[in-house]
Amino acid sequence: MRLSNIDRSVIHEGYGSKGTYELSNGTLIIRWEKFDPDVFIDVSGTWLHQSLLKQLQDIEHAALVQVGGRPVRVSKVQVVIPGTDYEVCLRPRTSDIPTFVQIFVSREYDTPDLPNTAEVIVDLGANIGLATVFFGLKYPEARILSIEPEAGNFAVMTANTAALGDRVRRRPTAVWTRDGLIDLRTRDAEGNTLGAWGVQVADSVEQPEATVTCHKLSTLLDQAGFRRGCAKCCPSDVRGASRIW
């Protein structure tokens, strides 16, 4: 279709159909001379007919796809954050999906309590880096320290935050009340997985899956070369917290 910016006219070049259009808030309405109106929705730069929205597959169910006539398992999906051209990687059937919805669809972090500017942001328990990306886009001048002790999460976080450049410092470690080593646990007492979102660190865990380094927040800030903005020690429940100053 060819749309005119002069008189709001539209021509369907394939069929010769003519009409006018309205464009507002990411919605394109075409009123044809001889046909019913069509409505298109802007999906990250691609105009999608509204009748196709209900046919889109829910990413939660994207466990398998067909390639060359053979079913294969999907391990990762690359998606574009709504309203941006920034891409992030998500792992189906994990907490990556609800976390993405929380941050970029429901916009739960985008509150009026946030400051207008920020110099330093610390993402403690950064998981796959979605909060880091959110704050990195919101505060393009801020330096960010992202901490994540679980190796799989850290690898995805590194990829997801790469486009933010060298203003992000990434550390594969845990935040604790001391510097040293600490146990990493990914399953509960009954052996059930805690999921990518539920990884825990604690002293003296029975049968820990791994042992990782841990540091005080002050140590990590010093190592990153960031200005000390917090004089308090980090407690054991700091996972998933973000501090901005």
Image (cartoon, helix red, strand yellow):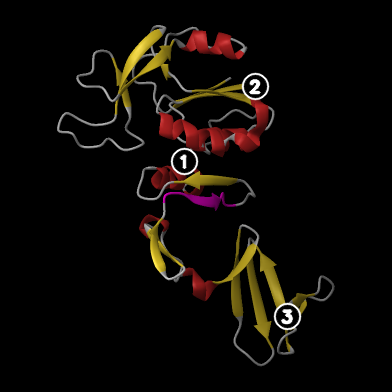
Q: Residue at x 42, y 29 (%)?
A: 151
Residue of label 2: 119
| Residue 21 position in % (x across, y down) | 71, 76
**For the N terminus, which image quadrant?**
bottom right
Q: Nearer the viewer, residue 145 or 120?
A: 145
| Residue 24 position in % (x across, y down) | 66, 64
Q: Residue at x 63, y 64 (%)?
A: 46
- Above or below residue 93? Residue 153 is above
- Above or below residue 49? Residue 233 is above
Q: Nearer the viewer, residue 197 or 113?
A: 197
**For the C terminus, which image quadrant?**
top right
Residue of label 1: 108
Instruction: Tell whether position 58 is magenta.
Output: no
Q: Earlier in the sequence, mark 1 or mark 3?
A: 3
Q: Residue furthest bottom?
A: 34
Give the structural element (helix, strand or loop) at label 3: strand
Q: Disc 2 and disc 3: Cα gap in Å?
A: 47 Å
Q: Disc 1 and disc 2: Cα gap in Å?
A: 22 Å
Span of residues in magenta: 75-82
Amino acid, disc 1: Glu
Give the number of callouts.
3
Residue of label 3: 20
Amino acid, disc 3: Thr
Amino acid, disc 2: Glu
Q: Specify few, some or many for label 2: CA neighbours under 10 Å numbering under 14, 14-19, or 20 or more.
A: some
- Above or below residue 147? Residue 40 is below
Q: Seen in the image, is 194 located left or right of residue 108?
A: left
| Residue 99 position in % (x across, y down) | 42, 42
Q: Earlier in the sequence, mark 1 or mark 2?
A: 1
